[in-house]
Amino acid sequence: MTKFYEVRKRDGAARLGRLLIGGAAVETPLLLSVEAVRSGDAPVLPAGAVTEGGNADTDKLLVYDVGELPAGWAAARGVVVLPETHPLAFDARDVKADLYVVGYAPRLLTSSRRLVAEIIRLRENIPPDAALYVPAVATPANVAFLIYMGVDVVDDAAAVLKGYEDVYLTDYGELRLSELENFPCCCEVCTSLSPAELRGLGKRERAELLAKHNSLALKAEVERVRERIRSEMLREYVELRVRTSPFLTAALRILDGEETYLEKRTPVARRSPLLANTMESLRRIEVKRFAARVVKRYTPPHRKVLLLLPCSARKPYSQSQSHRKFISAISEFRGHIHEVIITSPLGVVPRELEAVYPAAFYDVPVTGYWDAEERSWVGSCIEAYLRKNLIERGLYEHVVVHLGGGALEIFKGVAEKLGLEAFYTCGDGKEETAKRALERLRSCISELCAEKLPDKDAKANMIRAMADYQFGSGVGDVLLEGAEIEIKGKYPAYKVVSGGEALAEVAPEYGLLRLSLSGALRLHNSGFRAYEVRLNYVPRAKSAVLAPAVEDADPQIRVNDEVLLKDADGNLVGVGRAKMSGWEMVAAERGVAVEVRAVR
Ligand SMILES: [Zn+2]
C-alpha cells in the first residue's frame, strides 16, 4: 500500500509508473544522476542530506534508514532495505514506503542466481504499487534486464565509476579505452574528440569525459527500454540484450524458471506480436500458458479424423495461401475432420483457437531446421494433446498427418512412443502444398470419410473454444446455449447474438472474446464465479475502477482479461477489462484496476 507511486502500464514484471513528489510527477523507469543526488538536484535524496524538518513540505522523496522513518506520512518517502544477512535487516513487509532502496546492491552482481533471487524476493515482499530502486548497479548492457525483472529506479553510479577505470560502456558491453580506434556512439563526448585524443588527456579530464559518455549511453538505453514497455515488446528486446553477456543470458534463463513470479505479471493478451527468435522464446510465459490451456481448458469437437497441418507465416493460419489450399482439398468432408496445426513455439494449435493470443500474433524464423529444444518442447505438446484427446477421450478414429520436414519427424517420434498408427499424406515430406501432396491428402480424406459433410459448426466451435480457453472449460456451452443463438459477422470478428441481443464478440486485435453486459449476466446466472472483481461501489459505464475500490478479485485475473464486476453482495453490476492482475487489484492502493465497459 503506497500513497505516492502509481503504476500506469505493465509489460510483464516491467512497469511504467510515476512517483508523486512535492505535487509533481516523476516518470519511472527513472534514471538518477549521482551528480544530481550529490548536489541536491535529484528528485530522490538520502534523508541525511536534508536539514532537519525537511520532510513534510520537501519537493524531494527522502530515503530513510528504517529506524529513522518519520511517523507521519504527508510526503513520498523511501526506505533502505538491508540484505537478509545484515545484523539490522528487517522484513520489508513491516515497513510502508513509496520507494524501497536495495542496500549494498552491487553484491547482487556476484552471481546471476543471486541477482534474480534477490530482486524477486524484494519485489514479492513490497507492495506492487511501490517503486524498487537498485543503486550503483545499472549499465547500458544490464539495465533492460533489471527493469524487465521489476526494478523501477536505477542510477548512473556504476557507469560513472567505470569512466574512472578507463572503461567505455556500450549497450553490448564494456570496451577498454586503450582498444578503441573510433567511438561507436554519437553523443556529445564521442563526437567532440577521437579515442586517441581522449587517451592523450590527463587522468581526471579523461575520466570525466568517459563518465559522461557512459552516463549518456545509460540514459539512451533507459529511454529505449521505456519505449519498449510502451509498445509491449520489452521481452523481445531483453532476449536481444542479454546475448551480450553469459551472466545476463544465465540470469534470463534462471528468471524464466521462476514461472509463478512472471506468470502472475504477464498479460493474457498484447497488441504486439510475439517474436520467437531465440531459444529463450520457447520458455516464455505466453507460450507455456497457451500450451497449458490447450490441455486443461480446451475440449475438441467429436470428429472422425484428426488432421495435423503445418503452420503458416500469415496469421490466422486459415487466411494464408497454404491453408486455403489444404481447406480446399478437404472442404467437402470438413464436417468429419478436426484440424490441428503443429508449430513452434506454441506446439499444438486447434483450428478453433487460431485467432486467440498468441496463436494469431507470433512470428518465428523458418528454416526447416528444428533444434533439439524445439523438438522436445513441440513433441511434448503433441504427446499431451494425443494422450488426452485420442487415448483418454477417444475422440478420433483416424489420424492423418499432412506434415513435412522437422514437424513430421517430431510427430513420428511421438507416434512411436504412443504406439499410434497414422496416415501420412506428404509423400517424401518435403512440400506440403505440392500438387501431389494435396492430391494425396484429398484422396486419403475422401476414403476415410466416405460421405460428404460440410462443416456447419465451425463458427460455433470457434466461439465455444475461445470461451473455454479464456474463462475455463464449459463456459462456451453456457454462452451458446439455446435455440435463439446466432453467430453473425465476418471471420474472425464474429458476434454471438441471442434474440437480437449481443452476448459476446471476438476482439481480433487482442485475440480474446469481449463480453457484453448480457453475456456477462448469462455467465453469472449460470453460476459462473471466476474472473470476478468485487467492488465497494457501483461504477458508471466507460469509467475506470481504481484499485482502492476493489474489495476482492479472482487471483487468476491478468491484464486484459474480461472481468465481471460485482457488488459487495455478489450481484453482477457490470463488465470490463482488467488493467491489473487480480492479486494486484487487491494489494494496490493506487492505479486503474478495471476499465468499465457497461453497467446494469
Ligand atoms: Zn558517446
Image (spheres, rainbow, N blue to C red):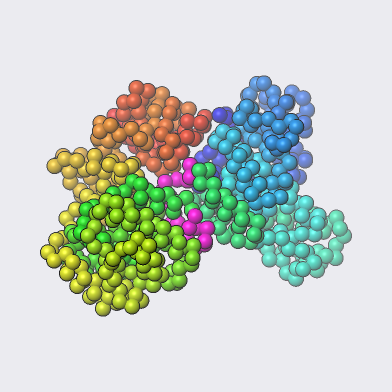
> In the figure, 210 relative to 371: above or below?
above
**Residue 554 magenta:** no
- Residue in the image at 73% along x and 57% along y: 213
- Decide if residue 268 is on the left or right side of residue 18: left
- Decide if residue 69 is on the left or right side of residue 198: left
Whether residue 108 can be seen here: yes
The spot of residue 192 in percent (x, y) is 75, 63
- Residue in the image at 57% along x and 60% along y: 240
Number of numbered discs overlaid on the protein picture = 0
Whether residue 26 can be seen here: no
> In the figure, 598 relative to 239: above or below?
above
Which segment did they paint magenta?
263-283
Q: Residue furthest right?
A: 202
- Residue in the image at 29% along x and 71% along y: 424
The spot of residue 434 in percent (x, y) is 29, 77
> In the figure, 345 relative to 594: above or below?
below
The N terminus is located in which quarter? top right
- Residue in the image at 24% along x and 39% along y: 478
The spot of residue 201 in percent (x, y) is 85, 62
Q: Residue furthest left?
A: 451
Residue 48 occupies which quadrant of the picture? top right
> In the figure, 100 relative to 117: above or below?
above
